Image (cartoon, helix red, strand yellow):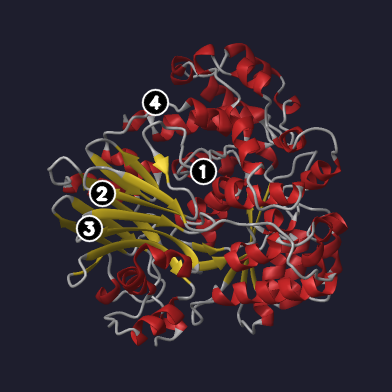
Amino acid sequence: MPAIATVENAMCGIAGEFRFDGTAPARDAIQRMSERLARRGPDAAGYWQDGPVAFGHRRLAIIDLSERSAQPMHDAETGLTLVFNGTLYNYPELRAELLAKGHHFHSDGDTEVLLRAYAEWGEDCLPRLHGAFAFALWDARRQACFLARDRLGIKPLYYSLTGKRLRFASSVQALLAAGDIDTQLDPVALHHHFTLHAVVPAPRTVLSGIRKLAPASSLRVDARGGTLEIPYWRLTAQRPARPMSEAEWTEAIHASLKNAVKKRLAIADVKVGVLLSGGLDSSLLVALLAEQGVSDLMTFSVGFEDQPEESGHEFEYSDAVAAHYGTRHHQYRIANSEVLARLPEAVDNMAEPMVGQDAVAFYLLAEQVSKTVKVVQSGQGADEVFGGYYWYERMQAERAGSPLERFRRHYFDRDHEEMLSMLEPAWHGPDHSAATIAARLAEPGADDFLDQVLRMDVTLLITDDPVKRVDNMTMAWGLEARVPFLDHELVELAAGMPAELKLASGGKHVLKLIARGLLPDAVIDRKKGYFPMPALKYVRGEFLEFMRAILDSRACRERGLYQRAYVERLLAEPERHHTRIQGSKLWHLALLEYWLQRNVDGAV
């Protein structure tokens, strides 16, 4: 069995086409998709074609660059061909099990383990996989293409399906590069986008001709274009049969989190980095890595210019953690002028429009980090899994109204009435977002209201907000970000924890108990912070003029999406128009329009 330290890592970009009309895929279309994914996989490129199917691959290799692990990976004996983006953290155990069943291996990495796992168990291999992954597999014997995505949607997978062909890729931009895409805006997706902080639940995207595979799902497409999508995992949020004390919960969560961090140390002989914001989550990762005995730990923090209302950095906390554990700390200060100059690049690397102000922060931080390490751990998911946001307590305190109403009052960026005043009448329709959220909250398997909310956050909202943001912005620099708080076994355990153990101590109570004694008290007891980028929250000066130019542009006016009276109202007083969770409504409008201009208008 290979040592974990020699893992071939499949973080990368994948693309492909499956024709149903008797023609062969055009190689140049696959190559255009692959070239558009080059930043996700700068180390190598691969291409494979057979009859109606062609696959392309861009590879980010962490250590092993041998041809034995090259992709697309084809096995003539089974008729299987695979392109794979991600990491299987349990691949050594799976490899041992497959060896015992008589399988033979020609490489040391997790890609071939996945190929052999499908050969052995077929689509039933998915529940056995622990990790972050998106892959496509051609099964020549069945003449079918099989796509799948990890449980929490950590790795992206987009596709375009017509009566003639299926195309898939790791980004929307790659599909657009191949051409023949319906780029009309999807009105249902728009409603979600402007209600849920730019979250558009799968399978939709803002473009009618591009869809995405839902987390924890597989999609089989046959030679006639018939499809079958099947979920392979569902999260329940119910108390265990035997009640657990606070001490027992704390011990269990601590053990599970340590295991999640240890799994993601899969490449033990390269430097380990942590994106250290100064908040509890990333600081706790530093402590747990030190607890694992990691030496020469490297930490990275970024800060921006202050505004009168808000500091642009949290260096006092990140510096304290770095000093406490003696990490090799890297601190970057970025001027607003650089933010504005680099904003177009960040938008070009957003697979979908992202309004989170820290998207640009992650992009600029990842650029610097990638010069030093190829793998980092990041604290995304802790707030959603352990109840860290202030609005959870406010929702819980509400007693009037349906679950939807309790949720909407503290979360929706705009109510439906405001949406109707914002969008031109051609884009009006029902309250799609309310219907989507009500249905997700009502799904069985959650004990109480907060269980419903947190389960929905973890399985729906987080996928297309912080998780997608971190993947897109780090992979734009060939940097792999691992997210231990979204280890599915930890998520399953935490989902059963009573709400009071999550919301106590101002949120994330159990994590704070674990951190006590490991981190400085000032880091544990501080008010919850966010990745600050004040210039995109309190819009003024050159940032205001930048957004004004976008929204006054000919392209924006001809698109006919926004009512001008609404736009002018926001431009007149941008700092008075914030969402319920303090996002800039003006930035929301400008970002979508700018993303369309940068990524779609030129691709049509």
Whether residue 435 can be seen here: yes
Mark 2 is on which residue type? Answer: Asp
For the residues labelled 1 and 4, the Cα–Cα distance comes to 28 Å
> Up-down: is 33 above or below 66?
above
Mark 4 is on which residue type? Answer: Gln
Which is in the foreground here, disc 4 or disc 3? 3
For the residues labelled 4 and 2, the Cα–Cα distance comes to 27 Å
Any mark on residue 472, and which?
none
Which is in the foreground here, disc 3 or disc 1? 3
For the residues labelled 4 and 3, the Cα–Cα distance comes to 34 Å
Any mark on residue 184, and which?
4
Mark 3 touching mark 2, by CB under 8 A?
A: yes
Q: Circle 2 sits in a helix, a strand or a loop, which is it?
A: strand
Mark 4 touching mark 3, by CB under 8 A?
A: no
Which is in the foreground here, disc 2 or disc 1? 2
Q: N-terminal of the two: label 4 or label 3? A: 3
Residues 588 and 338: in front is 588
Residue 19 x/y as whole percent? 20, 44
Question: Which residue position holds label 1?
Answer: 342
Q: N-terminal of the two: label 3 or label 2? A: 3
For this view, does 197 lie left or right of residue 8? Answer: right
Question: Which residue position holds label 2?
Answer: 222
Residue 83 x/y as whole percent? 31, 61
Residues 514 and 407: in front is 407
Residues 20 and 277: in front is 20
**Which quarter of the figure has residue 263?**
bottom right
For the residues labelled 3 and 2, the Cα–Cα distance comes to 8 Å
Question: Which residue position holds label 3?
Answer: 142
